Amino acid sequence: MYKVEIKIQDIVIIGVNSKIQTIKDNPMYFLPFVADATQGAAEGKQNITQTIIMVVVALLFFYFILWRPEQKRRKNLEQKRTSLKKGDKVTAMGIVGTITKVNTDTVVISSCDETKIEVLKQAVTDIITPAQEAKATGSAEAESK
């Protein structure tokens, strides 16, 4: 078996002029490598800070542009779904009809040919109350004149 021992003094460094030196010959020759390592650590710390700032900005962007408006829209629609009553015109899964009966979790929708369909309240995507419908038809008649 062979026993290999390497001492720090025996590390060979090739300089710019291709002159071979050891740390034992010139210990100051190794210092620029140490300085570069400490400078790299400071730059790494700055890069981490910049990365954290960018992640926080991205999260704020997504919160105010996507999540918050979606939460408001969902809350508004849920409030409308809980206030459904007989006579409201609704759209559920693309089916347009008038509510004829309201149950706890479902509503019965009557379409134009008196076909009745029972759907979940969660399937209702658009609600037009009779007051909104009268307002809409009143403004449509005014435009046609």
Image (cartoon, rainbow, N blue to C red):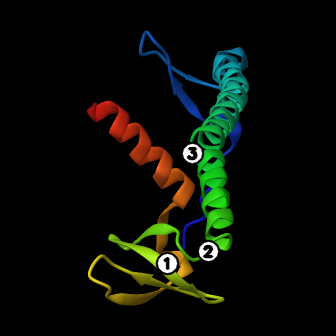
Q: Earlier in the sequence, mark 3 or mark 1?
A: 3
Residue depicted at x 60% and y 61%: 77
Name the quarter where the C terminus is drawn: top left
The 10 Å Cα crowd at callout 3, few under 14, some 14 to 19, many 20 or more, is few
Whole-percent x and y of residue 23? 66, 26
Mark 3 is on which residue type? Leu
Give the spatial CA distance, label 3 vs label 1. 32 Å
Mark 1 is on which residue type? Ile
Q: Secondary structure at mark 1?
A: strand
**Residue 129 sits in quarter:** bottom right
**Residue 37 sits in quarter:** top right
Q: Earlier in the sequence, mark 2 or mark 1?
A: 2
Which label was assigned to residue 99? 1
Query: Measured along the vertical axis of the image, is residue 143 above or below residue 89?
Result: above
Q: Are marks 2 and 1 in contact (CB under 8 Å)?
A: yes
Mark 2 is on which residue type? Lys
The 10 Å Cα crowd at callout 1, few under 14, some 14 to 19, many 20 or more, is many
Give the spatial CA distance, label 2 vs label 3. 31 Å
The 10 Å Cα crowd at callout 2, few under 14, some 14 to 19, many 20 or more, is some
Query: Measured along the vertical axis of the image, is residue 20 above or below residue 7?
Result: above
Q: Are marks 2 and 3 in contact (CB under 8 Å)?
A: no
Query: Measured along the vertical axis of the image, is residue 104 above or below residue 86?
Result: below
Q: Residue at label 2?
A: 85
Residue nearer the viewer, 93 or 44: 93
**Residue 24 sits in quarter:** top right
Q: Earlier in the sequence, mark 2 or mark 3?
A: 3
Q: Residue at label 3?
A: 66
Name the quarter where the N terminus is drawn: bottom right
Q: Secondary structure at mark 3?
A: helix
Whole-percent x and y of residue 71? 65, 54
Residue depicted at x 67% and y 59%: 75
